[in-house]
Image: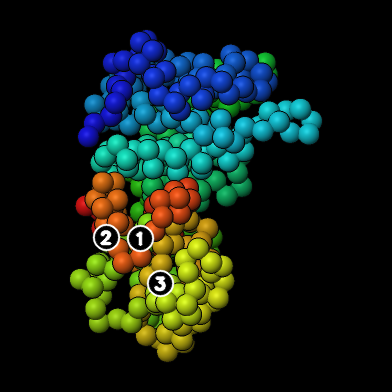
């Protein structure tokens, strides 16, 4: 399936306003301090107009234009659900970047947009504000290197520049400062050789330790002494994680939350604390023994993965994440055919935490996307 809109539709705003998420943006107010132009949709139209006027856009490939167009169109799509009036009366939309990336991931998956294109758009939305302030970060070089592992920095620069230019600020000095910071972000990325390619590392362990802030040189390998390999499954229920394990990891023991639920007679809708604790203790037993194993759970959010990966690294495990995904319609069918189909409401709730893993999180990422 292709996108329902294109940059060739710009100006015919009625085509855009047929979508409920556009109509929601049109009724979402913003602080005049940074958005005197008005609602989120008014700002978004200005961003799109700024985007297509840029030299970089004009000379971009068709694929890049499609990605940049959709990243700009949807960069603030979660503001209607995250906008709050603070105690001092100031309007804020804290968390709209992460919420927007997750919402866009779900939306484009349902539309059948190819994985690589979808993830490029979602990740641009996730970090679209970072160039506004990164140059002032004391650990900025590390964060810039990490960014490059999952997002094209030249594309991110274009989105950030269009976002900042496509508005009217009561505080014009703040706008000028942000534009200066974006230009410095661009110069820094080029200076480090990260403008349109990811940072390179001496080894996967170097990369992971550097991303975790435990190592400071990308070209020097820290001490490596792995006691076992932990394979951590990632994906929504019904995506095919069990099938991947049967096809690729039959020789290893599997720590399964589903198995523990069955053993402890706990329903998926019940409190899961006992299930999680039992699974983590089984994981520890394999880690202490230095035995390779598979950890089979959804691990949908980055925060949840970080907690569990931290445990694995404490025991000197080599960590590989296996992400499994099938097309939306196939997933719906597979879930219905499961012995214990997950209710749609539960799937929607889980999908609201869905973050695809990247190379900043583990030694190895295996993407099994069909």
In the foreground, 135 or 40: 40
Alpha carbons under labels 2 and 3: distance apart:
16 Å
Secondary structure of the residue carrying numbered label 1: loop
Secondary structure of the residue carrying numbered label 3: helix
Alpha carbons under labels 2 and 1: distance apart:
7 Å
Q: Earlier in the sequence, mark 3 or mark 1?
A: 3
Residues under numbered marks 2 and 1 in contact, where contact means CB atoms less than 8 Å apart: yes
| Residue indicated by mark 1 | 341
Residue found 23% across the figure and 73% down from its top: 246
- One can see residue 193 in this view: no
Residue 165 at x, y percent in the picture: 51, 19
Q: Earlier in the sequence, mark 2 or mark 3?
A: 3
| Residue indicated by mark 2 | 337
Residue 75 at x, y percent in the picture: 46, 31
The tally of labels here is: 3
Q: Is residue 44 left or right of residue 34?
A: left
Residues under numbered marks 3 and 1 in contact, where contact means CB atoms less than 8 Å apart: no
Residue found 51% across the figure and 43% down from its top: 98
State whether residue 108 is above or below residue 245. Answer: above
Residue 5 at x, y percent in the picture: 31, 23
Q: Few, some or many C-alpha atoms within 10 Å of disc 3 (few <14, some 14-19, many ≥20)? A: some
């Amino acid at each position: 399936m292709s996108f329902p809109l294109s940059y060739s539709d710009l100006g015919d705003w009625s085509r855009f306003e047929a979508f409920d998420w556009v109509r929601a943006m049109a009724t979402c107010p913003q602080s005049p301090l940074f958005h005197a132009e008005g609602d989120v949709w008014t700002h978004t139209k200005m961003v799109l107009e700024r985007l297509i006027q840029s030299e970089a856009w004009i000379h971009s490939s068709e694929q890049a234009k499609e990605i940049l167009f959709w990243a700009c169109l949807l960069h603030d799509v979660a503001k209607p659900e995250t906008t709050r009036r603070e105690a001092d009366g100031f309007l804020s939309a804290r968390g709209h970047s992460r919420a927007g990336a997750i919402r866009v991931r779900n939306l484009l998956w349902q539309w059948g947009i190819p994985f690589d294109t979808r993830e490029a758009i979602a990740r641009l939305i996730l970090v679209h504000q970072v160039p506004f302030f990164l140059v002032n970060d004391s650990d900025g070089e590390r964060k810039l290197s990490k960014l490059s592992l999952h997002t094209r920095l030249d594309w991110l620069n274009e989105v950030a520049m269009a976002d900042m230019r496509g508005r009217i600020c009561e505080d014009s000095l703040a706008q000028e400062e942000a534009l200066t910071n974006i230009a410095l972000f661009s110069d820094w990325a080029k200076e480090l050789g990260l403008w349109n390619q990811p940072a390179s590392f001496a080894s996967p362990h170097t990369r992971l330790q550097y991303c975790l802030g435990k190592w400071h040189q990308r070209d020097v390998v820290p001490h490596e002494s792995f006691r076992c390999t932990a394979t951590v499954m990632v994906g929504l229920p019904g995506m095919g994680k069990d099938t991947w394990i049967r096809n690729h990891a039959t020789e290893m023991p599997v720590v399964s939350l589903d198995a523990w639920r069955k053993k402890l007679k706990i329903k998926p809708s019940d409190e899961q604390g006992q299930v999680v604790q039992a699974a983590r203790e089984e994981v520890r037993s394999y880690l202490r023994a230095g035995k390779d194993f598979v950890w089979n759970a959804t691990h949908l959010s980055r925060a949840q993965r970080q907690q569990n990966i931290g445990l694995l690294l404490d025991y000197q495990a080599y960590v590989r994440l296996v992400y499994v995904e099938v097309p939306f319609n196939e997933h719906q069918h597979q879930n219905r055919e499961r012995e214990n189909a997950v209710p749609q409401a539960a799937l929607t709730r889980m999908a609201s935490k869905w973050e695809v893993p990247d190379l900043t999180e583990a030694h190895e990422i295996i993407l099994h996307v069909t």
